[in-house]
Amino acid sequence: MLDEKQRSELLEQLVHSPSYRVAYRDADLMDSPDLRHVRMLLEFLKPDLILRRHHVESTIVVFGGTQVTEPASAQKRLDQARQRLAVTPDDPRRRRDVARVERIAAKSSYYDVAREFARLVSSQNQVEGRCEYVITTGGGPGIMEAANRGAHDVGAKSIGLNIRLPREQEPNPYITPELCFQFHYFAIRKLHFLLRAKALVIFPGGYGTLDEMFDALTLRQTGRMQDLPIILFGRKFWERTINFQFLADEGTIEDRDLDLIHYVDEPEQAWQIIQDFHKK
């Protein structure tokens, strides 16, 4: 027979036992490898429910490099690199740094182009309560910031799908707060990029941009996603980066696969391609 003190002590142990926690409030359980599938499902459901609640019917996804900043910022970075080189002009690493930053500065005009493109699309499609062709980015700096900023300029909503990285990436400040999401799983993030997309617009970038582009190209090539235009800003950059014609000439892709890609240099060109594509 338990006395009151023993009973109280045992009850205290029971209610603080990990097994007694309500399952969905058990952080240790939710973080365990065995519940990865549950976490992935939740990561899909949360943005999906919120986007439905905000009546987001369709999106235009803008990809591009984090390093491609606005011209003033790019020039400041270049000036700093040149100042460092002036101190030790024979340092090969600093010469290399200046050369790289010069190339980034030369691409800084794409920041303004991405911003203008987002302004153009958002001002024509988020009117009278409609939420069509909502600008969507990876939520970070550079080209992503420019596109979110363009929508913000005209008072329109835009979406940011940020990702947890070893070096933390903060969301840019121009995303609509209610439509700013953080992901752990790249696969679920990619799914949300494409789920409502009516076009993919891709600016110069690095590995992440290339990964997202080729993921979409493969799905379009194999008919595993909706028809949409894939638009590359900057023909000169992209034709030097990837020789798609060579792949076709070598027979590793079909000639018709080249038609999946459209090259443009101006915001109006991109928007016209999107309109014409969906009219068909």
Image: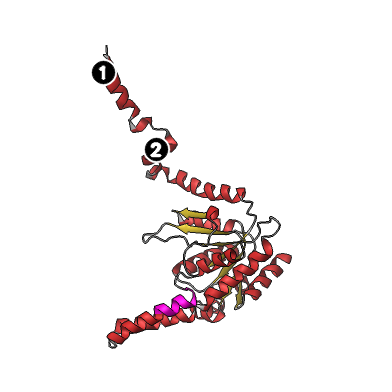
Q: Secondary structure at mark 2?
A: loop
Q: Main secondary structure of the magenta part?
A: helix
Q: Quadrant of residue 22?
A: top left
Crowding near pointer 1: few (<14 within 10 Å), some, many (20+)? Answer: few
Magenta part of the chain? 68-77
Q: Residue at x 45, y 75 (%)?
A: 73
Q: Which label was assigned to residue 26?
A: 2
Residue 95 highlighted magenta (yes or no): no
Q: Residue furthest top?
A: 1
Q: Is residue 161 above or below residue 52?
A: below
Give the amino acid at mark 1.
Answer: Lys
Q: Quadrant of the C terminus?
A: bottom right
Give the amino acid at mark 2.
Answer: Asp
Q: Residue at x 57, y 47 (%)?
A: 49
| Position of residue 177 in the picture relative to residue 119 (left or right) | left
Along the line of sight, which residue is nearer the eye, 230 or 178?
A: 178
Q: Residue at x 33, y 30 (%)?
A: 16
Locate residue 257, reporting x and y percent.
Answer: 60, 71
Q: Is residue 27 visible?
A: yes
Along the line of sight, which residue is nearer the eye, 4 or 21?
A: 4
Q: Report which residue position mark 1 lands on.
A: 5
Q: CA distance from mark 1 to mark 2?
A: 28 Å
Residue 74 highlighted magenta (yes or no): yes
Locate residue 12, reporting x and y percent.
Answer: 31, 25
- State which mark lies toward you, 1 or 2: 1
Q: Is residue 5 above or below residue 154?
A: above
